[in-house]
Image (cartoon, grey):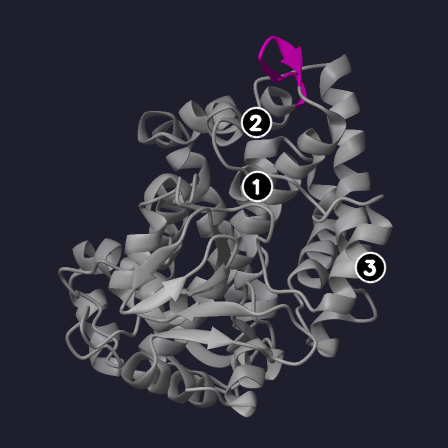
């Protein structure tokens, strides 16, 4: 099944800004060619993996399918720009989601304990305050707002700034950098920046944070990273900056995308919203369904270290594979009625947080954040409806809605 237009659609940012087009594309692949050799013009070729079972099969074999050297979808021209900008390095950052063992295990250990449930529970009260304040500010706007821009974009950023110990006045700058970083091919979101510009802005911001924490360490996560050692030596400046960028960016856009996309799903499925209002104990399950539904991480790459056969296709050593998470999370063989939003869906074995050793490091914190926010929102807001057309970010990597105009009334 070789089709240049299909291959072009897989890499086209516009595909991911038009959900119907995205779902039709991947439904076709799952049915007709789930392990699809993809040769889009201007890109190095790769296999597109669209089935839930296959994504898990690859993710659990981290020695046979590694992260390096290709971690995300970039055109050949842009890959060249990255190497030029990075003095020959193929990546703008090198965080744990770009590492393989043994480095992956060593660098993950730096913050692993910090993200465990026992530690995150110490933050729950403070996160609840941020959620309450965020809903306060939404209600202060009257009866209408752009939920993504005014609320969902800010809430996870404030949590990130809490755990990193970054003062509030840096919020607007970090928000601008993050939106440009995940803008993909969406000119409206990038606003003249590209991925290289945004990455350098991130790195320069966090260089100052690291210098300050080395001089005056505190008990925040920024200090843990700034003073970390691997194999008895301080970690390098590149790895330090990369760690900050990964935590600040991944912990922001994935959550803002899930909250806004999840709220849209509830608006479009009022029976599911009533279900949550009547039984708030279902909110944790609803958050899992929101992650499945939105799938804010669109893909990661893996590279085969040996020849491997998958669904009768021969994947050669050195071949690259794109793991299509939105497709896996709509797989008819993995989920009953996958195109229905079911707030209390169970079981819900989505791969929205990844799988295996590369599953999201901060997934427990992310769930706590989203549960706290949805509890606050649904307990204080009555009717919520669209006040205009939603719009999705045109990005093939990480993202969700870029506009969600809503009209609402507060509970009396």
- For marks 3 and 2, the one nearer the N-term is 3
Image spot of residue 70 (x, y percent): 59, 53
Task: Look at the image and give the residue range highlighted in magenta.
Answer: 226-234
Which quarter of the rendered picture does the C terminus lie within?
bottom left
Question: Which dot, 3 or 1, sits closer to the camera?
Answer: 3
**Residue under circle 1?**
247
Q: Quadrant of residue 287?
A: bottom left
Question: Which dot, 1 or 2, sits closer to the camera?
Answer: 1
Q: Quadrant of residue 188?
A: bottom right
Mark 1 neighbour density, 10 Å: few (under 14) some (14–19) many (20 or more): some
Residue 249 appears left or right of 79: left
176 and 1: which one is in front? 1
Residue at the top extreme of this rendering: 232
Mark 2 neighbour density, 10 Å: few (under 14) some (14–19) many (20 or more): many
Question: Magenta stretch containing residue 232, yes or no?
Answer: yes
Residue 221: which disc? 2
**Residue under circle 3?**
81
At 72% from the left edge and 62% from the top edge, which residue is drawn? 180
Q: Do the residues labelled 1 and 2 touch (CB within 8 Å)?
A: yes
At 20% from the left edge and 60% from the top edge, which residue is drawn? 348
**How many labels sit on residues?**
3
At 58% from the left edge and 84% from the top edge, which residue is drawn? 8
259 and 7: which one is in front? 7
At 28% from the left edge and 65% from the top edge, which residue is drawn? 52
Secondary element under disc 1, as helix, strand or loop, is helix
Which quarter of the rendered picture does the N terminus lie within?
bottom left
Q: Are marks 3 and 1 in contact (CB under 8 Å)?
A: no
């Amino acid at each position: 099944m070789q089709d240049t237009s299909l291959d072009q659609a897989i890499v086209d940012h516009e595909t991911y800004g038009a959900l119907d087009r995205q779902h039709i594309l991947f439904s076709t692949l799952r049915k007709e060619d789930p392990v699809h050799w993809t040769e889009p013009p201007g890109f190095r070729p790769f296999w597109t993996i669209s089935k839930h079972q296959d994504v898990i099969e690859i993710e659990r074999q981290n020695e046979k399918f590694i992260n390096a050297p290709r971690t995300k979808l970039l055109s050949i021209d842009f890959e060249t720009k990255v190497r030029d900008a990075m003095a020959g390095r193929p990546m703008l950052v090198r965080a744990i989601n770009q590492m393989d063992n043994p480095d992956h295990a060593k660098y993950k250990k730096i913050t692993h304990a910090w993200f465990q449930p026992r530690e995150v529970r110490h933050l729950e009260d403070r996160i609840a305050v941020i959620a309450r304040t965020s809903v306060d500010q939404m209600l202060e706007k009257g009866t209408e707002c752009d939920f993504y821009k005014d609320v969902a974009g800010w809430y996870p950023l404030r949590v990130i700034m809490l755990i990193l110990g970054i003062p509030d006045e840096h919020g607007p700058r970090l928000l601008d950098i993050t939106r440009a970083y995940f803008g993909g091919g969406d000119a409206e979101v990038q606003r003249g920046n590209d991925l290289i510009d945004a990455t350098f802005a991130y790195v320069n911001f966090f260089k100052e944070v690291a210098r300050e924490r080395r001089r005056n360490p505190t008990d925040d996560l920024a200090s843990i990273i700034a003073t970390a050692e691997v194999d008895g030596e301080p970690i390098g400046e590149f790895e330090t900056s990369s760690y900050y960028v990964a935590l600040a960016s991944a912990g922001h856009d994935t959550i803002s995308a899930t909250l806004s996309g999840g709220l849209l799903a509830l608006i479009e499925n009022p029976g599911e919203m009533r279900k949550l209002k009547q039984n708030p104990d279902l909110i944790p399950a609803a958050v899992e369904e929101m992650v499945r539904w939105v799938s804010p991480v669109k893909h990661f790459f893996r590279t085969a270290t040996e020849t491997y056969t998958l669904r009768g296709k021969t994947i050669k050593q050195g071949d690259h594979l794109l793991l299509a998470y939105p497709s896996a999370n709509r797989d008819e063989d993995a989920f009953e009625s996958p195109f229905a939003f079911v707030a209390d869906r169970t079981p819900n074995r989505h791969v929205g947080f990844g799988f295996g050793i590369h599953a999201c490091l901060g997934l427990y914190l992310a769930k706590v954040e989203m549960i706290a926010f949805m509890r606050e929102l649904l307990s204080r807001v009555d009717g919520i409806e669209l006040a205009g057309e939603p719009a999705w970010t045109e990005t093939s990597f990480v993202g969700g809605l870029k506009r969600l105009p809503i009209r609402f009334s507060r509970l009396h």
